[in-house]
Amino acid sequence: MQVKELSRLFVVITVFLGMIYSALAADPAGFDPVKGYEFLASKNENGRYENVVTTAVAAVAFKDAGAIAHADQALRWLKEQEDDTRHCWPKGSCKIKDTAFALWSLNEFGENTEAGEEWLKSTLIPALRNNWYLQIVTTNNGACRISYPGPNGREEEMIQVDAGTFPQCSAAPSNTFFDLNQCLRVRDVVATRSSVDFDINCVDLGASSVISIIFNSQNSYSLVQQATTDRYQAVINNGCFSDNPSDSTCSKDASLFTNWILSQLAASANVEIWLKTVYDPLKPLDNALFAMATKNNQQTFITALTRTQRNDGSFNNEVYETAFAILALKKAGSTAELNAAVEWLKTRQQSDSSWGGAQNTALVLYAAFSNVPVSLPSPGGGNGHNNERRCGDNICNGDETIESCPQDCETISSNCNENNVCEVSGGEDSDNCSADCYCGDNICDDYERSSNACSTDCSSQSQEFCGNDIVEGTEECDGADDGVCPGLCTLSCTCEAESSSGGGKWIIFLIVFLLLGSAIFFYIRGKAKNAGRSVGKPSQEYRPFTSQLEKAQPQQQKMNWPSTASSAKSKIEDDIDKSLEEAKKLLKKL
C-alpha cells in the first residue's frame, strides 16, 4: 500500500510541475509588441529614425499598425531627403541601398517611384567580365543574323553555323561555342555593359534550333537562357550594384537588397546573374532575399532557407536575419517555420522593449507584428501632414546652413572635422561626415554597421577589436557602445546577463520544487520510522497457509476510524503542511 501511495503522489507532483513549466515556456517573459512600437516612437526626431533605411522601414511598420500620424511624419522626412535633381537618397551623398529602401517605402504609400528607379538603373556597373558564349544546337547549315548595341547605334552581322559549329570563331575552347565578347566586330559587348540585348535570327536553320546563352568562369558553365526557336530576343543582365554610385566594385549587400526591392517595384532591371555567383546557400539572408526577388525557383531558395533554421526557431541566432526570413516565409506560406521564427522573436525583446536598436525593432515589428493594433500619442514636431520647411524644426534642410540656421545644422556639422580621418569616437560616420568617412576606409562606422551599407569595412572579422568603444564583428557591445545592453557591457565585449521577470519566475519555480521535494522526503522518512517500530515486535509462529484457513474464524470487518491518539498532528505532518502552504503562496505570484 505504501508503494502505491508514493507512486500516486509522485505522478501528481510530476504533472503539476509539468503544467508550471509549460505555462512559463508558452509565455515569453515581458513580450509586448505595443511597447516595441512605443520604443520605436521614442526614437523619432521630427520624422527621422537614425537614417534613411531605418526611417523607411519604420514608416511602413507604423502604417501597417495603424499609427498613421507617425507613418506620415516619417514619410515626410524621407521626401525631404530626396535629391531633387538626381532623385536619390540622401541628398548630397546618395547611396544605392538608401535609395532602394526609400523607394520601397514610398511605393508602400502609393507614391510614384519611376524617377528613382531610373537613377538606380543608371548606377548599374558591369559585373561578369569572363566568357559569354552563344550556342546553337542544330543539324542544319546556314547563317544567323545577329544584332546588338554598338558605340554608334545598333550593329548587325551574319555568323555562319554548320551543324551547330561556328567555323569563323576560334576564340572559344570549343567550336560549338560562339564567344560574344571576342567573335563580334565590336569587342567586349557583354563585358563592358551592365545589360545588353541580342536579336538572334536563325530562320535559315529552322524552328527546331535550340538557342542558348552560356556563362563560363574557369571550369564552371552556367546556362543563363535557352529557347527552341528560329529567332530569339536575348537580354543579358550582367550588372551589379556598388555601395556608392562612384564605386566600381560590386557589393553583395547593396545588390541583394536592391535586387529584392526592384522586384517589389516590378522594375525590369535585376542583378540575379551576378548574385548567383556569390550566393551562399548556408546564409539565411541570401536565401530570404533571393526567395522574395526571384521569379523562378522560389521554392528552391525557401527549402534552402528552412534548412538553415535553428532548433530554437531563429536564423543564425540573429534578430535581423530572422526578420527577413519571416518575410520570405510569409510570401511562400511556410506556416510551421514561420510560427517558430515568430515565437523566437518574442523571446528576444529586451528590457527596454526593443529588439536591439531602432532598425532591428522596426524590422521585427514590420515583419512579425504588423497586425497588432497600436494607439500612440501624436508625434512631436508636427502632425505629420505639414510639409513646411522652417528653421527650428530640427531638420537641416538643403537651403539651411550652420550660419543661417545653427539650431538645425550645428549638431550635424560639428560632428565632422573634415580632417581626412574618420573619428567614430567623435560621432563621425559616412552618413553625417562623408568627407572623412566612406566605404573602403577600413573603418566600420555607426552608419555602415547599422544599415549594412558597406560589407568591405564591416564584414571582416580581422577588424574586430574589443576595447575601442565600437561594436565590430561578433561583439555584442564595446565599452561606451552598449546600446544593446546599457551599462551591462563586460570587458570581453559581451552583454552581462540581466535578471528579468522571467528569471524571477524560474527562481520561484525552483523554490516550489524544493519545497515539494522536502514534503516528499519527510513523508517517506515518517513512513520508514513507523515501519522501523514494528520490526522489534515478536514474530508470530509460522503456520502453513492451509492450516491458517482451517483454523480461521469468521471475523467482523474492521473500520479504519481515526484513533484518538492520532488526532493530533505529528511533527512530520506539520512540516509537510508548512511546506505546501509556502508552495501555494509562491505559486500565486507566478
Image: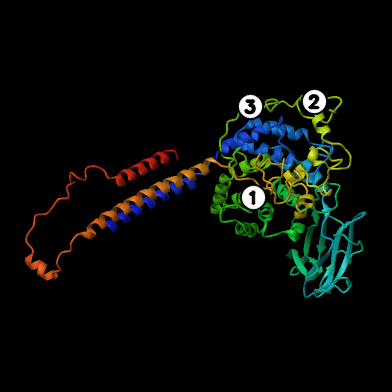
Point out the tag, 3 or 1, that comes first from the N-terminus: 1
Q: Splitting the image into 4 quarters, where does residue 150 fall?
A: bottom right
Point out the tag, 1 or 2, that comes first from the N-terminus: 1
Quadrant containing the C terminus in the rendered view: top left
Residue depicted at x 23% and y 60%: 535
> x and y percent of residue 384 in the render?
68, 28
Q: What separation in Å lies between label 3 and label 1 (alpha carbons)? A: 32 Å
Quadrant containing the N terminus in the rendered view: bottom left
Task: Tell me the amino acid under the disc marked 1.
Answer: Glu
What residue is shown with label 2? Answer: 407
Is residue 37 visible to us here? yes
Pick whichever, 421 or 193, lies toward us.
421
Please give the label number shown on residue 318: 1
> x and y percent of residue 525 in the render?
32, 53
Query: Viewed as shown, does residue 365 lie left or right of 22?
Result: right
Q: Splitting the image into 4 quarters, where does residue 144 fall?
A: bottom right
What residue is shown with label 3? Answer: 378
Q: Secondary structure at mark 3?
A: loop
Is residue 268 visible to us here? no
Q: Examine the rendered structure and indicate whether residue 378 appears above or below residue 9.
A: above
Q: Examine the rendered structure and indicate whether residue 64 appears above or below residue 383.
A: below
Please give the label number shown on residue 460: none
Task: Tell me the amino acid under the disc marked 2.
Answer: Gln
Pick whichever, 238 or 526, lies toward us.
526
